Image (cartoon, grey):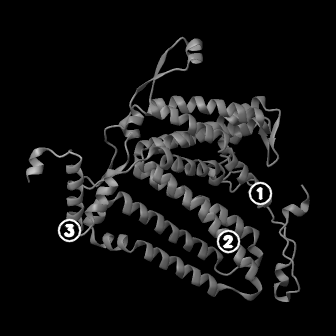
Amino acid sequence: EADGEDKLVLPSEGEGDLEGECKAYTPDAPPSTDNTPQCLNKALEGLSSRWKNWWIRGILSLTMITGFFLIIYLGPIMLIFVVMSVQIKCFQEIITIGYRVYHSYDLPWFRTLSWYFLICVNYFFYGETVADYFGALVRREEPLQFLVRYHRFISFALYLAGFCMFVLSLVKKHYRLQFYMFAWTHVTLLIVVTQSHLVIQNLFEGMIWFIVPISIVICNDIMAYLFGFFFGRTPLIKLSPKKTWEGFIGGFFSTVVFGFLFAYLLSQYQYFVCPVEYNSETNRFAVECDPSDLFVMHEYTLPAMAQNILRWKTVNLYPFQIHSIALSTFGSLIGPFGGFFASGFKRAFKIKDFADTIPGHGGIMDRFDCQYLMATFVHVYIASFIRGPNPSKVLQQLLVLQPEQQLSIFNTLRNHLREKGMLPPAVLEQ
């Protein structure tokens, strides 16, 4: 790559007041630090750097996976808090890169406004979640009714205040860089906060829609690394020189098999397959239901070719297992492009990792670059192929209407059911 491709050049075009901005600027990577625990360094000191990194990544990966399943055990509310914490940390890592790159310009209010916009966007998204999934709580608490009723207006007013603060903070000699940073913040919000909200939306559809996609990405990451480490010979993409075709293909097949088996395991438990709903009587999340057809065993007839090979005519599967193949295929073929995108971003600013939070892995964003892309796909997939009308959400919306509106809807529904002959005679006589 030519050096010029990694430089940000701000031509002056004769503007004297932008003289400080008009230098070719190459971001300096922050000095790398080794935050590996001393006990690990001591235990692995006799190994080559390649194998030392392998063991560090392996041990830390197992630790994170164990923590992930512990959080699942603690329930949906803990998962929501974890998603929020991850989102904030990812936002902080990306914003910090921008701050380090342009630190010498001392842009006024950049970091303060960035965090303010984060608060505004989270207020909007989490307010939408409260309105959609906590209807019983909203009806019981009058202050919440006011906030939900005017939620979008309040959200817009908060954002508008930040927008005006940005305009008032503009300084003549920093105009261009301030607008760069304004765009930097908003793109970060789009990538991190919006997609984090989709993760939570997927969770409310049932914990299986949260756990399986995340596990698929984790499995693909691990298996691609292992296949690449032991068998990798052919480079895959220039953005990530260590990625190989062997790792990419091995990760794909391993992930499809893992997703299919893991989907079978989780489909057997109500705790994972039932939509997450708030119970106003117990003030807790409930995950009890009659499982939908997706999670009821069906018998499928195999194609003739498969019958000849397997000597089976039919197989019993959960329909969700078939959907898991689509999820695994996306997670292993398209999901890695989220990582390639992050690699391109890091190369553009000459940094190795987003941060050094996790020894051997980098920052939190380094671990979640593919997860956000996967979350968006799962949300679109559910909306396109899975989700039908939600009776619970419709009922919540009906209960907040005025009594005369509720009565009008009741009469319309009764007449509709009467025309279809679905009402028993006793109801018709009334």
The amino acid type, in three-letter code, at marker 1 is Ile
The residue indicated by pointer 3 is: 403
Q: Quadrant of the C terminus?
A: bottom left
Instruction: Using the image, tell me which numbered label, if any, was put on residue 351.
Output: 1
Q: Residues within 10 Å of mark 3 (few under 14, many from 20)?
A: few
**Nearest to viewer (mark 1 / mark 3):** 3
> Dot 2, how many residues are within 10 Å of its Cα: few (below 14), some (14-19), or many (20+)?
few
Alpha carbon distance from label 2 to label 3: 47 Å
Q: Which residue sits at x=52%, y=20%?
A: 302
Q: Alpha carbon of mark 1 to alpha carbon of mark 2: how far?
A: 20 Å
Q: Secondary structure at mark 2?
A: helix
Give the alpha-carbon distance from disc 1 to disc 3, as whole Å.
60 Å
Decide if residue 268 is on the left or right side of residue 19: left
Q: Taking 254 as reference, is 418 left or right?
A: left
Residue 100 position in % (x across, y down): 73, 68
Q: Position of residue 187 (x, y in %)?
A: 64, 65
Q: Is residue 315 visible?
A: yes
Quadrant of the image for the N terminus?
A: bottom right
With respect to residue 190, does 427 lie above or below? above
Q: Which mark is residue 102?
A: none
Q: Residue at x 63, y 48 (%)?
A: 370
- Choose the circle earlier in sequence order: 1 or 3: 1
Please state the horizontal and vertical placement of residue 192, each as a whole percent of the image. 59, 59
- Label 1 sits on a secondary structure element that is loop
Q: Nearer the viewer, mark 2 or mark 3?
A: 3
Q: In what element is the residue under mark 3? A: helix
| Residue 183: mark in rendering | 2
Q: Is residue 103 above or below residue 51?
A: below
Pointer 2 or 3: first along the chain = 2
Residue type at mark 3: give it.
Answer: Pro
Where residue 168 appears, as percent x and y from the top left, is 62, 87
Vertical position of residue 163 compared to residue 91: above or below: below
